[in-house]
Amino acid sequence: MEHKKLVPFPEDFLWGSASAAYQVEGAMEEDGKGLSVWDEFVKIPGKTFKETTGEVAVDHYHRYKEDVQLMAEQGLKAYRFSVAWSRVIPDGHGEVNEAGLQFYENLIDELLAHNIEPIVTLYHWDIPQALQDKYKGWESRQVIEDFTRYSTILFERFNGKVNYWVTLNEQNVFTSHGYMMGSHPPGVKDPKRFYEANHIANLANASVIKAFRELEIKGKIGPSFAYGPTYALDSKPENQLAADNNETFNAHFWMDVYVFGKYPKLAMKWLEENNLAPTIEEGDYALLAEGKPDFMGLNYYRSSTVEHNPLDGVSEGKMNTTGEKGSTEAGGVPGLYKGTDNPFVEKTNWDWDIDPTGLRIGMRRIDSRYELPILITENGLGEYDTLEEDGSIHDTYRIDYLKAHVKAIQETISDGVEVLGYCTWSYTDLLSWLNGYQKRYGFVYVDREENDEKELKRYKKDSYHWYKKVIENNGVTD
Ligand code: BGP
């Protein structure tokens, strides 16, 4: 569908950028912060690229004013960040640490003073280690109450200052990596435990949204979901079926629960057949039904392409966490689908498909099925950057990537889809969970390497100046 004339971006469109606590803050044990599962997990040899940790990260905890100053100068309209649960409640369920809350209040006030809308993520993967030790974190229903209490403390403290709240960041990613692939904490590889923990996370998500409504907190709330559309390799019906399976099991399986309060029938049938269905207790569906969000937060990086996978076909693949192009090995689920190469798109050095049209397709699919406004909570390009001697960084490839995605958003708006805003990933460079510091995403370069923090000095990349203009011109990219 080509439009003769593109509809302009809405006047109040949120041109933003994002980060997450563990990836930027550092100050691991400062001002009473408790440890999170990530603080501990990264100590296990071989889990992260070159054993990198977020102990110091990019020191945003101490440099937040400098970072907000850079945002202000750029004209940024919104900044999405996450709160570290263990900073606010060090052991996850006991006493509140006022110094932790104060840090976030200072950050929010600093943003507001510069007319930057704070978008607050309640959970970006860093559950307090104490809860992991006490009751296995997301595997116990006790987490529902603890997570709701923690969230309520934030709602009440920042009510009126924060208008956009994100509940769980990429529930599909933290549960599948944490319990199926063993690559995120708690490092478990057990499909049964994965589906159980995921169900509990669904209940926690709904419970927090329910509390938000009951307390009549101002603003909008919704999850951030990692989604990219799935394509079939070709028009062979078996491959189309595989694409269908992938959408059902990797997208509807979460978004249906958020919006409709139930799992897709097809997926539940398969889970039951394979003895993997989560335990549903009385009252679960009633709670899920009360968790309908105000928007769908969308983290989009890439689309994926699949083909038929026989019952004795491949399962586990291999991730590229080194930046050696071509080192990914596609995985799948026997009997459902397997990943394959899309010959029509370019890839990054980490083998992620670059596909701006995929963003448009994805948003249209979300719009048709869920009829909710979309807030793009992440989108960006992880690449190697070079700091030149004069302090410049010529990241043309990032500008190209972002420009194409901004255009795709405008086309999607022109298709009639409601899009509230666009947060790029990320504002400053930061720690990529499994890929160290060399996989950079920011508008602002941070001078540090995997195991050398240097001075953590900030430099504006070319993309910084480019985005400044995009914001000034409300989406006109050149
Ligand atoms: C998303 C996460 C972010 C961020 C991003 C880039 O899944 O929400 O926290 O890390 O992906 O991914 P990566 O760092 O693996 O390149």
Image: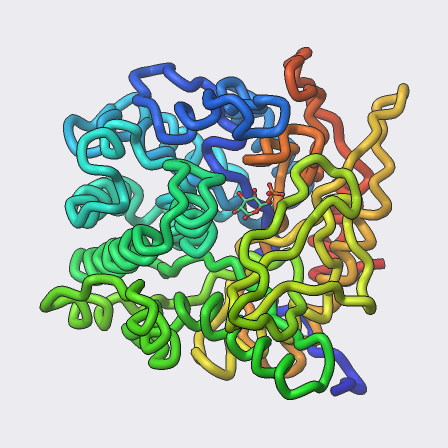
Instruction: Look at the image and tell me in which quarter the N terminus lies.
Output: bottom right
Q: Is residue 288 depicted above or below 98 in this figure?
A: below
**In the depicted structure, whether residue 103 falls above or below residue 407:** above
Residue 159 in the image: state x and y as whole percent.
28, 48
Residue in the image at 75% along x and 32% along y: 460
Q: Quadrant of residue 406?
A: bottom right
In the displayed orientation, state which residue is furthest to the left.
282
Above or below, comparing residue 133 to residue 398 in the picture: above
Residue 119 location, x and y as percent?
Answer: 45, 48
In which quarter of the view is residue 156 placed?
Answer: top left
In what quadrant of the picture does the C terminus appear? bottom right
Seen in the picture, residue 95 relative to 123 is either above or below; the reply is above
Q: Quadrant of residue 126?
A: top left
Q: Ligand 1 lies in which image quarter? A: top right
Picture coordinates of residue 233, whole percent (x, y): 71, 75
Residue 169 visible, this angle: no
Q: Judge from the rendering whether residue 253 lies leftward or rightward of residue 433; answer left or right.
A: left
Residue 38: x and y, percent? 42, 30
Query: Residue at image x 44%, y 75%?
Result: 372
